Amino acid sequence: MNPAGLVWGPDGALWLAMQNGFAQAGRIERLDANGTVKGYALPAGVTGANGITLGPDGALWIAASGTGGQGQQGVILRLTTRGSFTTYALTSTRSDAYRITAGPDGALWFTEEYGNRIGRITTSGAVTEYALPTVPTGSQCVYVLMGSFYDTNGQRCPLGITAGPDGALWFTESQFLAGGGNKIGRITVQGAITEYPLATRDALPGDIVQGPDGNRWFTEERGGHVGRITPGGQITEFPLPGAAGGATTASVSAGPDGAVWFIGTPARADVGGTIDRLYRVTADGTFSELRLPGSAGAVASGGGALWVAGVGQIWRVELQ
């Protein structure tokens, strides 16, 4: 199984979303302060957990894949800290839910990677979906880290999403080849969308987070940078040190030390690179890095430390 997301829960534990893979169904795992791990099988009809966040109601909310896996009907799950699930099935075509975040309006907002939509769900389960602007057909959405291409008939492939201090949601668009994606998007709680294109062609922006400096920071699965976008839409891309022939940056988190942390590799993950490094970047683009004991899939901040999830293990990184 592949780690897809981490969040620090209201119970003082770390919660981990696991995607399906290698003939295994996805699951949710909880790591408590004593290092004890408890797993929760996903409800029937749910095959993988793609993103996780803490909701305003004190529960965990999960963006998930329904029957048929990625590219099919999506599901939003609510999970209490006692382990009780509530399932909200999405009904739109190709509504597979990818990432999820708490919004400024008391609702949860999520991306539909293959559905070309941003979704909103209230804590009572009412769903609203907003279509991204249309693009020419014939392009592809690519999920580089899995090494597979999916024909999305010109979809923009929204991936990461985060709430900004301006009262809007910010998200990434990761369409490949024919253009139309490769942007950072902003959506108001009323559903108005603005898009900001990246300068790097086919960068494939992935995850995005609200940084401690008031800007949004995002990763690029193929562009070799970590990026920053201001509230006014000005984008700066910082090249990964030591990268040759492209690089991959993946999961990103704001750290308790006022910096932004992300995982990545100076060699592209789709051509053999292993995501085994944890990077720190300051607001002025100064980098430092830490070599991890193995391949990583997600990073998050909580309890005064950084947490990194690998395949079959979780690392706690103490900040000096």
Image (spheres, grey):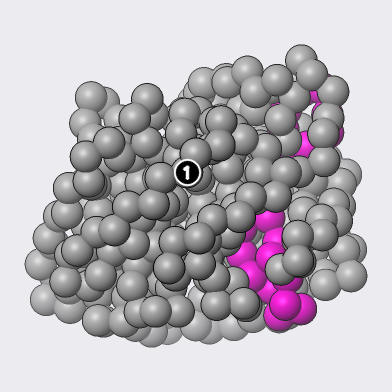
Q: Can residue 164 be spotted in the picture?
A: yes
Q: Residue under circle 1?
A: 90
- The single residue placed furthest to the top in the displayed view is 138
Residue at 39% across, 79% down: 57
Residue at 83% across, 72% down: 231
Element under disc 1: loop
Question: Magenta stretch containing residue 146, yes or no?
Answer: no
The reply, left or right, for residue 7 in relation to residue 159 is left
Q: Quadrant of the C terminus?
A: bottom left
Q: Nearer the viewer, residue 179 or 118?
A: 118
Q: Is residue 275 above or below residue 138?
A: below
Residue at 27% across, 36% down: 45
Q: Amino acid at mark 1?
A: Leu
Question: Magenta stretch containing residue 178, yes or no?
Answer: yes
Q: Is residue 295 above or below residue 228?
A: above
Picture coordinates of residue 23, whole percent (x, y)? 23, 24
Picture coordinates of residue 264, whole percent (x, y)? 53, 48
Residue at 65% across, 28% down: 141
Q: What range of the chain is rendered magenta?
A: 160-182
Q: Can residue 309 be spotted in the picture?
A: no
The answer to which image quadrant residue 6 occupies is bottom left
